[in-house]
Image (spheres, rainbow, N blue to C red):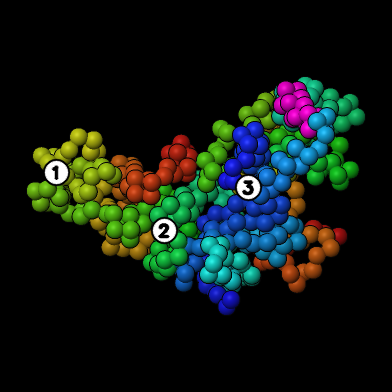
Amino acid sequence: MPVRESEAIILRTYPLGDADRLVSMLTRSFGRIKGVVKGARKPKSAFGGLLEPLTYLRVWFYENETRELVRFNQAELIESFLDVQQDYAAGIGLALLAEVSEAVLPERESSDSAFRLLLLAARTIKQTRDPAFPVAYFCLWTVKLAGWLPDLTACVKCGRSAANEAMYAAAAYPGLACARCKRPGMQLMPGQSLSAARRMLSERLDRLAAEPAPVSPGREFQEYLLDMIEHNGERKLHTRRLLEAHA
Amino acid sequence: MPDFAAPIARLVDELKRLPGIGQKTAQRLAFHILRVSREDALSLAEAIREAKENIRECSVCNNITDADPCLYCTNPARSQKTICVIEDAHNILSVEKTRQYNGVYHILGGALSPLSGIGPEQLKIKSLIERLKGGTVEEIIVATSPTTEGEATAVYISRLIKPLGVRVTRIAMGIPVGSDLEYADEVTMSKAMEGRREI
């Protein structure tokens, strides 16, 4: 059993047995993995505060081919997000990043772009303490990387350009539709939202967030993205309800 | 599952629903219950029934109790000027073991946890604010766990309470007594440095 090493971001932990923790983390080299940290809940555990959600760390773990769970051996902190989560709004935003990553990313499939996206979004929330824009950017790119994002430039049925006009969309239907081709149940996506989304697909988050008035895809488009994540991930997001209640 | 008689299978299924109990442990417990005398087995069943029927939440602090208000709230020897806020009723034991705290408690029933869908509405924060309206409380000690959820809850509560003019304190975080600094993780060590005090 060789020891494996990777950078990782903690997504979620669950208490296990008397003093252990089951940890779900996104590693840069091995994708999303789950494993056990023995004695992690004891006060003298060497892992201590390293297993809090969104902590960015380097981990060493053993993998047994016959077992689904890995066994974590050692960890070293790279960056902690503990302090920013004291802010309730920022904490909900960070929790949504973790929950979406858990829902969307398959186990043991490495994705450097998903790892970098999660880290960038978490760092932007840490810097700005405002989760709205980083969460929108993260959801848009998550949907894009998962291959669920439709063409944002034209109607999927008649090809009519969406450059300056509103379109209609629903998570259950592929593609955007113009006013003439829309189907029942589709929601209005204002033209402004679509152009903001197109801009977010061509710029880095930290650059956009640094602008005096960052672009916003709007509430309708944000809901459409979350609907798509819930629809394709086949689960409801707990953090979505809290985020909407707090907004 | 092997073909057990229906009553045993039911007992195993019920035991399996307890935390930390898997199939094998449930079977072991079920066969132990069958092996002990009828009186002992029924005594266990009676204890469970009695606890479920007689134990309720204290209307003041939300502690689990058989008398309302609970013995901590009604004890005249305990100071009503300090309230220690904790996540769950079993956390009282950890504080009581120190024999250094003589105030009363308030149990929140958990901590803010967006990943589990627990927001402020699911916690007993409103009843804590109500308790402060009498004007006798001078200090709130927030003794939630030193985790992301516990910290977020502590900060959330302090933002609500501080404008009411009540002192809000947080239990210290850092290196456990008897441990070796060499093995302390970076987050714990930085919290210990942040919370250092003059000697």
**Residue at mark 2:** A105
Q: A133 or B60, which is in the foreground?
A: B60
**Magenta span of residues:** B41-55
Of circles 2 and 3, which is in front? 3
**Which amino acid, mark 2?**
Leu
Residue B44 falls within the magenta-colored stretch? yes
Question: Mark 1 falls within which chain?
Answer: A
Label 2, label 1: how many angstroms apart (C-alpha)? 31 Å
Is B65 situated left or right of A32 in this image?
right
Compared with A181, B67 (above or below) is: above
| Contact flag, marks 2 and 1 (Cβ < 8 Å) | no
**Which amino acid, mark 3?**
Gln
Estimate the x, y position of residue A191 in percent, counting from the top left. 20, 46
Q: A160 or B54, which is in the foreground?
A: B54
Compared with A113, A219 (above or below) is: above
Q: B56 or B196, which is in the foreground?
A: B56
Q: Helix or strand or loop: what does disc 3 sit on?
A: helix
Q: In which quarter of the image is residue B3?
A: top right
| Contact flag, marks 2 and 3 (Cβ < 8 Å) | no
Of circles 3 and 1, which is in front? 3
* In the image, farthest residue toward the right: B77
Q: Which of marks 2 and 1 is nearer the N terminus?
A: 2
Estimate the x, y position of residue B118 in percent, counting from the top left. 55, 39
Q: Residues within 10 Å of mark 2 (few under 14, many from 20)?
A: some
**Residue at mark 1:** A178
Determine if marks 3 and 1 fall on one subunit.
no
Q: Which residue is drawn at 79% across and 59% down?
A: B176
**Residue at mark 3:** B23
Estimate the x, y position of residue A15 in percent, counting from the top left. 64, 51
Q: Which residue is drawn at 71% across and 29% down?
A: B62
Label 3, label 1: how many angstroms apart (C-alpha)? 56 Å
Q: Helix or strand or loop: what does disc 2 sit on?
A: loop
